[in-house]
Amino acid sequence: MSNPAVSNKEEKPEEQQKENQSSWKDFLYNPRTGEFVGRTASSWALIFLFYVVFYGFLAGMFTLTMWVMLQTLDDHTPKYRDRVSSPGLVIRPKSMDITFNRSDPLNYRQYVQHLESFLKPYNDTAQEQNELCVHGQYTEQDSSVEKKACPFNSSLLGQCSGQDDPSFGYAEGKPCVLVKMNRIIGLMPTGEPFINCTSKRDDAVPMQFFPSDGMIDKMYFPYYGKKAHKNYVQPLVAVKLLLTREDYGKELSLECKLHGTDLKNNDERDKFLGRVTFRVKVTE
């Protein structure tokens, strides 16, 4: 004869499981009340409508504020410019340590290729489309939308143009280094700007500058920005280091500075503001 108490205890877990399944089914969908996940269809519709209106309002506000902000911007000149008012100087090839063996073309090929690539926009074909400007005068064009660019042909770089000497002097151990100013929209330096380079050792290193005396013509200023000044190329100064055998194997520290203007070239907080320092070491 079976024990009723034992039978009841065995049936309780099964009943509990059935009740749990039933409650989960009712939570997902209750056929008696028509609720789905605890809410009726009309309740879910109201919630969906609320979020559509709420996020639509946020999207509209974002679109409106962006439109208002865009109306205040100039297509050619940034509204806020946090750059310094004086330009920095940089060199090409793009290396602060130019070290090579002049007897091994593979050793200095990277420098030559870098200069060739950099000077492509300066070749005669590319510069033919630019208009002649008046030497010694600013080329102000505030009234025109698309600005004309004054030509700067690579031939102005003389022995450092790569035309007569494809190795840019590296094969003979007298390398060329190109120095350029960073672009600053609206910059109009006073005086007659020029770049001069000196050795940071006691005895001077002979150098030759192209254009003559490292002059930068004022006709290349002001710059109006990449969008308006599409064909603009920065004026360059080429420095040819006239090294001798006595200089080979020595690490020469050189510094180029911007002179003849009101622009800064001695700010200790910024080593590239109006100046640049680099090292050259030639072996054979």
Image (tube, helix red, strand yellow):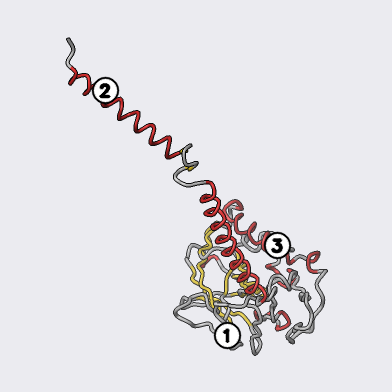
Tell me the amino acid under the disc marked 3: Asp
Q: Quadrant of residue 25?
A: top left
Quadrant in the picture for the N terminus: top left
For label 2, the crowd category at 10 Å Cα-Cα, with few meaning under 14, some 14 to 19 and many 20 or more, is: few
The residue located at (59%, 67%) in the rendering is 62
Q: Identify whether 100 is placed above or below 234.
A: above
55 or 175: nearer the eye? 55
Q: CA distance from mark 2 to mark 3?
A: 101 Å
Residue 11 image-quadrant placement: top left
Q: Label for residue 11?
A: 2
* Circle 2 SS class: helix
* Residue occupied by mark 3: 165
Residue 89 appears in view? yes
Residue 175: tell me if it is visible.
no
Q: Which residue is mark 1?
A: 263
Residue at 38% from the left image edge and 31% from the top image edge: 21
Label 3 sits on a secondary structure element that is loop
Q: Is residue 263 left or right of residue 121?
A: left
Give the mark, 3 or 1, whose residue is nearer the N terminus: 3
Picture mark count? 3
The amino acid sitting under disc 1 is: Leu
Q: Nearer the viewer, mark 1 or mark 2?
A: 2
